[in-house]
Image (cartoon, coloured by chain):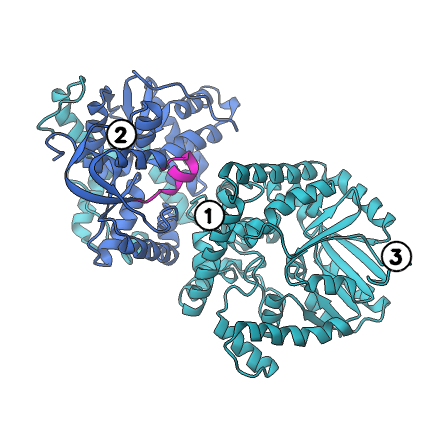
Chain colours: A blue, B cyan
Amino acid sequence: MALPARESPKGKRVSLFVTCIVDMIYPGTGLSVVDILEHVGVQVDFPPDQTCCAQPAFNSGYREEARRVAKHFFKVFSDAEVIVTPSGSCAAMVRHEYPHLFAPEDGAAYDAARRMAAITWEFSEFLVDGLGIADLDLSLPAKQSFALHDACHGLRGLGLGAASRDLIAHLGKAELRELNECEVCCGFGGLFSIKMPELSNAMLRNKVNNINASEAETIVTGDVSCLTQMNGGLSRAKSPKRVLHLADVLAQGLPGGRS
Amino acid sequence: MTVELQSNDFIALADIALANPDLQHAVGSGTRGGYARRAEAMFAHSSEHGEFMRGQAAEAKRRALRRLPELLETAEANLLANGWRVEWAEDAAQANQLVQTIAARHGVRTVTKSKSMLSEELGVNHALEAAGLRVVETDLGEYIIQLNDETPSHIVAPVMHKTKDEIRDIFIRELGMTPTDDAEAMVAFARKMLREDFLSADMGVSGANFLIAKTGSIGLVMNEGNGRMCTSLPRVHIALVGIEKIVETVEDYATLTQVLPRSSTGQSLTVYTNILNGPARSDEDDGPEFAYVILVDNGRSEIYGTKYADALACIRCGACQNACPVYRSTGGHAYGWVYGGPIGAVLTPLFVGLENALPLPHASSLCGSCKQVCPVDIDLPRMLLDLRWDQVRTGESKAGWDAAMKMWAIGMTSPTRYALGGKAARVGQAVMGDYMPGLLGNWTQHRDFPDFAPKPFRQLWKERAPTLNPSPIKREGLA
């Protein structure tokens, strides 16, 4: 199915879809996103009734439940001009799966699904591809080295990857290093991680080994779900390394940093 | 050995594979090597060129599948004109019966076989052995697993799950090979053993990579040359051909052989790329006297009419297996039937029934690597999602998940209930500590779980909102 055409988001008000995990576990990442967006002159609002993109139900085959939650999303973001979300996975859900969840005979819901798909942007993609800003004119307080972990849905669903690297490359005092198998799944996969925990853990071990072998001090990624999996494994393996969300890394460079 | 269906035991079989260090090493390096070689071969010129080849191949295969019934008739007519004898088999029983009948008709005692996944699906070896025939697998990998009474674990590298040392031990145990650690010496030894069988076989059984409709030919690609020995030395040749193997023209065959070797072994072309045109003509010295094509359905036409029809475009290159982080961790046997990896997770439920392969659609983190590397662009993740949906619709999902998902949807469609859920999670975590109960314990068994934030973002936003300054750049004293 052809995706709805995307208009330039320049000059438009941004509605933040913070995602349920950021909301409940990493609210600081949500604030970093807001700070960076405002730093580049974007007006941000936060529709307070938002919940989840519906991916857990969709990915486990519960389409009816997913449709109900997606319809809630439509209601919450009905007057959004542009939606930005700090997750490649949730953005892919909105962009690729919403149009699949509804058929033309669903009428308004179908139209809403296509509209949401057209106006939703992942955070790094919004900055670099949407606004055309890779250089945020920010510099870290001290030298740090980073490597990117390309979260799956962002990389293969949305074609992201270059945008994050671009943003880090332009961040003062940040150095980019390699991460072996940076494009390979960390083993999270949503409910996969609890339905098939041993397999998920085998994939995680591989990721942890690669992170430990990387020259980078810090791993950067665009999804807090993958970040939770990787940090959970790193912490359990007593590794000193950690994974940060791209927005939190960039926000370290804001004047005064982010508390 | 005939494969025994045990796909419902995927999780237990995966655990066995995860606990096998030899398998972990062999499959881990085999798949990663294949993955890297594929990328190098596909994109040797440029990524655009690689994607262009993929696009051409995908289209050639789709064009043929769209006209499958008509092209099968064309193929049959042209095969007959070339002197092939053509048989049709609806299922495994019919196919095996035909193979047995043909063998009996020609007084066959020894059969050499070249690699064929379809023959695994049908259990042809078992059927021939049951009829008192001697069957020798001649692909080196297949030869090894036949000696060890196993089934192939990978579509193109059937013995990928074994280390070199394990293979050496099989040769010593089963064939009395003089112990050696030299891989070349081991290959030379196997070649010598096989040579005698090639020369004495009465019948060769092969698969087909492609069935070329317009010319009535079988397209076969191989590296070891064993396939040629099977199809040309014995008096009788049988090609087992799944009906989805159809392509329209020789040009399409050429298009597809651009991506098949690149995707499976990282070669721009296999050592042997064959077009077989039936039995030896009267003026030809080489080739079989009798050449048969058995066109096998075995569930394919049923898939053809469904939303999974596109899975029939698969050209069995194994790239999705090499790319899949789940397959890399388990190898193929864990999938509990003929085909492992992402394509197996899709095909197995379609062939054997969803109820007999319930875990397979979930044996994926939906990372999308399989779709990315597929030379004919099959959207395997979407099919896995659709199979999961089918499970829920047909009531084959676990009742516990049904209830959990209903509750979840109720929570996620109301901001008040969502906020209450968040609070409950924070309290629950405070009470439970680092190790969570029930299903969530599957998480904390292997990884730490972060603390829920004392205040969710929505609350921080409310506290922050009055100071919000929509004008850019300057922000201080936030949160």
Residue at image mark 2: B415
Q: Rate crowding at label 3 as few (under 14), some (14 to 19) or many (20 or more) other CA atoms within 10 Å.
A: some
Q: Chain of mark 3?
A: B
The residue located at (34%, 39%) in the rendering is B407
Q: Name the spot of residue A255 as percent of width and height, x first.
A: 12, 29
Residue positioned most to the right: B282
Q: Chain of mark 2?
A: B
- Please report whichever mark, 1 or 3, sits nearer to the chain's N-terminal start: 3
Residue at image mark 1: B397
Q: Chain of mark 1?
A: B
Q: Name the spot of residue B368 as percent of width and height, x first.
A: 45, 43
Check disc 2 and report its element: helix, strand or loop.
Answer: helix
Q: Rate crowding at label 1 as few (under 14), some (14 to 19) or many (20 or more) other CA atoms within 10 Å.
A: many
Three-letter code, disc 1: Ser
The answer to whether the residue labelled 3 contacts the one labelled 2, judged by CB atoms less than 8 Å apart, is no
Residue closest to the eye, A48 or A159: A159
Q: CA distance from mark 1 to mark 3?
A: 57 Å
The answer to whether the residue labelled 2 contacts the one labelled 1, judged by CB atoms less than 8 Å apart, is no
Q: Which residues are magenta?
A: A148-161
- Please report whichever mark, 2 or 1, sits nearer to the chain's N-terminal start: 1
The residue located at (15%, 19%) in the rendering is B469
Q: Which mark is residue B281?
A: 3
Q: CA distance from mark 2 to mark 1?
A: 28 Å
